């Protein structure tokens, strides 16, 4: 699943550590999300969307199986 997380984070001037703290995960989780090595739970996806005030589909782009 592709995502725009790194772009959103950088556009908002937020470090991985700051974002991780805000959504209650580790910095490594944010790094893995940004690099496409990890797909978030629905709960984490909602927390990220809420943090950036966007829809989940604005961050995570489902491309099929």
Image (cartoon, rainbow, N blue to C red):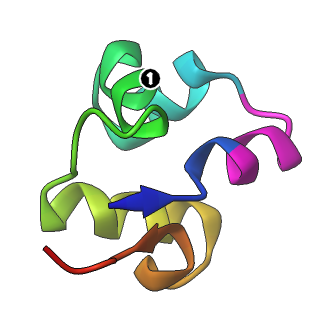
- Relative to 6, say whether 42 is above or below: below
Q: Is residue 10 magenta?
A: yes
Rendered view: 27 above or below 64: above
Residue shown at 74%/32% (left/top)?
Answer: 14
- Asked if 29 appears above or below 43 in the picture, the reply is above
Vertically, is 65 above or below 24? below
- Residue at the (25%, 55%) spot, across then down: 44
Q: Residue at x 35, y 27 (%)?
A: 32
Residue behind mark 1: 31
Please give the range of residues in magenta. 7-14
Q: Nearer the viewer, residue 38 or 16?
A: 38
**Left or right: where does residue 14 sit relative to residue 60?**
right
Between residue 29 and residue 50, name the one nearer to us.
29
10 with respect to 45 (left or right): right
The residue sitting at 74% across, 48% down in the picture is: 7
Left of 45 or right of it: where is 52? right
Q: Quadrant of residue 29?
A: top left
């Amino acid at each position: 699943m592709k995502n725009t997380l790194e772009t959103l984070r950088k556009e908002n001037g937020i470090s991985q550590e700051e974002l991780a703290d805000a959504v209650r995960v580790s910095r490594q989780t944010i790094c893995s999300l940004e690099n496409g090595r990890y797909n978030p739970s629905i709960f984490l996806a909602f927390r990220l969307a809420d943090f950036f005030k966007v829809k989940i589909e604005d961050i995570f782009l489902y491309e099929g199986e």
